[in-house]
Amino acid sequence: MTRFFFVDSLSPFLLYSHGILRLLCMKNSKYVRSLVYKFRTSQKKKESLFFLFDIVDYYANHNNTNAWKYCEIALEISKSLDETLRVRTLLMACSIAQYLGDNEKVSSFIEECRAIAGISYNKEYLSAIIDLFFAVREGRKANIPQLIELCSTIIPIVERQGTPRELCTLYHSLGLAHSFLGEHDTALTYLQQAFAIAEQSSLLTQQLRTRYSILEIRFRLGDNQYVIEETKAMLKEITEHELIAFEGRCRLFRGRTYFHIGQYENSIEELTKALNIFQKAGDIQGEYYAAINLASSYREVGFLSESVAQLLPLLQLQDEMWWEVRYHAYQLLGTIFITTGDAERAIQLFYHALAQLHNVTNNLEFFTAPLYGNIGYAYLLTKRYDEAELYLQKVLSIFTDSSYNKHIVSALQNIGALHIQRNDYEIALECIKKSLNISRQIQHKFGILNSLILLAELYNRQSHFEKAIEVVQEVFDITLNFPSLRSEMYAHKSLALAFEELGNGSKALFHLKQYNILHDKFWSHDVAAGIYDVFRVIDSITHEKAHNSVALQKEHLEIEIRQKHQELRSMALQLTQRNQILHTVKKEVEKINESKIKKKKKSLPKELLTSVRTIETGWQTFFTGFHAVHAGFYEKLPSLFPMLTEAEVRVCCLMKVDLSTKQIAEILCVSPRTVETHRLRIRKKILNGRTEDLRKYLIHLEIHG
């Protein structure tokens, strides 16, 4: 959650004041209000504005409502200052307004920023910092390609003219983007650059934000001990400076980490503290995500009613901006119903989760893949094996060749479990061993435990009982340092079966009793009954969808179509990269043929150049995939708009999948200027003078064959 503030270099007096300002904010808010009154009447408008920037920055980490009060004063003062300071102030106001959920103010401020930049002598720089603001916003929406594209165009401008905060924000945003794509080494490089700038410029909150993002990557890489130690050190600094919002995030991180190493009581303690801090600070987003993580921890220790109680209010959020919160809440509720043994109800809830993704246009796979895994597992429990395999193979195909190894492990385990049920033991063994090897490589303890338990089940099915007992012993060895009640429960079940088959009744009875004790903790009938009572309320919230399977299937179909659309866009981007390489090869071949030095030697055959030109154009490759998603669009568009040429129809198809001018030019092997010319002509022929956005018009235009 990167915040976005611009503060220029401060005078020595202001640097000194900055040192005591935080103390004033913490200890004497009345004095701060008195000081702000003097700012409003002071002739030193620029210095007053810098004071207000710091005050807003402080309160933004405590209470956004208070931050907005001082932000309004900064907006008033900036009206009489130069356009650069005005734009910086407007962007700061946009950031606070976003956190308060006031989208109308955000739009108004952005419009004013664009207007100022359009007539400014410093247009390039102002446009760059506006684009930087949009890059951060696209990152919050998980629109990573757009974030990287925006940042790439403004790097040289911000490096040349930007302030330390802007440069720090730029590198931080790029780091988060590459982390999201799983490119962790690149991400860490950018984040370390951001941290170095923040440290050199004494930007405390930027240092903490960057460290927080580095922790996120180390967390994904499984370095849990580092995360716990680093967050402990950060909490000490945060407490000293009373940065409440950062304390909430830090405790949220510790809670998540304790969850992943199986220390659920510690996880619940940290997450409860985080939830209380977010509520105190007025950080609604932090509050919602703390509730989701707390619900996960409650589920793992068998407190299912408490888990549902955390999630229920999240389902009732009406604002579209909270779609991701509802998505996670529905998905987690589905896993709770799998825990209670009601896989049918779980499937219904997973479809509700899918329905929350109707506005997601980028990185759809990132959200759908884990959900597809849950749907596949739920179908497996209902013995609908064909549907289960369909969803589980989707997950595997999405994450193959990615760095999200944990998802690959989960998919392989579920596919292995599926083949155990089908008695395809060889395929099951292959999948389970793959998942175990990957889990060991990335030190994924949950993955190792689940793989071992599946392996024990497979050995029991094959009557290899001694092997099953040996495998389960490793489970118990791991859980000595990595508690997992669920793993222990299934381990006791496997041992009970193995010892029974081997004729050792006393040991079989002992492990069966242990299994029942743990089973009752997770599957208490009283708890389950309470959950179903709560879900009467959920039925009233989602009545129409809950009782309309056709609507649910329609929602699911729409998600499938958009998934294919995103795959098509990825294919197009790969084609542009291939064409760039081929274009370079072609130029080098032409240089060799034209070289006077090699005049006497036989030139490279013309067939080589012809071959390069033949495969250089990616249109036919792209069209095959495009037709599968948008059947009839290419053929029917000319009948709807007869004035369009063949080249213009192709440009329309490429615009429909939201490609940029540069990407379209690379696929068609023409210059960007040629594409711009096509777009101008298309606009005249299709929109006929209307001011609509041509790209959006084509994206939403439906023509069926």
Image (cartoon, helix red, strand yellow):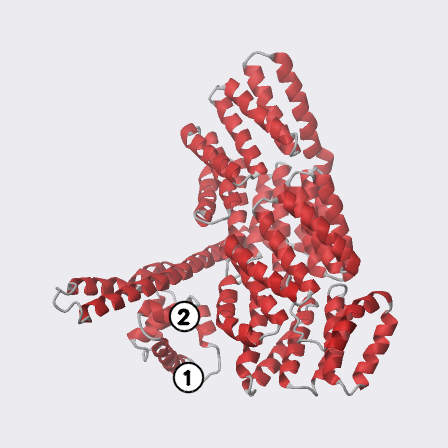
Q: Which residue in the protein does label 2 denote?
A: 655
SS state under label 2: helix
Q: Which residue is mark 1?
A: 688
Counting other residues with Cα less than 10 Å from the Cα at mark 2, is it few (<14), some (14-19), or many (20 or more)?
Answer: many
Q: CA distance from mark 2 to mark 1?
A: 18 Å
The answer to which of marks 2 and 1 sits earlier in the sequence is 2
Residue at the image position 45 percent from the left and 57 percent from the top: 561
* Residue 513 location (% of width, % of height): 68, 21
Task: Tell me residue 116's x, y (percent).
Answer: 59, 85
- Kindly report which numbered mark, 2 or 1, lies closer to the viewer in this rendering: 2
Which residue corresponds to the image point at 69% horizontal and 50% vertical from the top-left?
Answer: 231
Left-right relation of 442 to 570: right
- For image coordinates 48% across by 33% down, the residue present is 432
Quarter-of-image position of residue 684 = bottom left
Checking the image for residue 38, the label placed there is none
Q: Residue 286 is drawn in which quadrant?
A: bottom right
In the picture, measured across the screen, residue 442 lies left or right of residue 267, that is left
Q: Is residue 207 or residue 315 the one in the foreground?
A: 207
**Residue 677, image x and y in percent?**
36, 81
In the rendered view of the protein, which quadrant contains the N terminus? bottom right
Image quadrant assignment for residue 25: bottom right
- Report if residue 537 is visible in the image: no
Tell me which amino acid carries mark 1. Answer: Asn
In the image, what residue type sits under mark 2?
A: Met
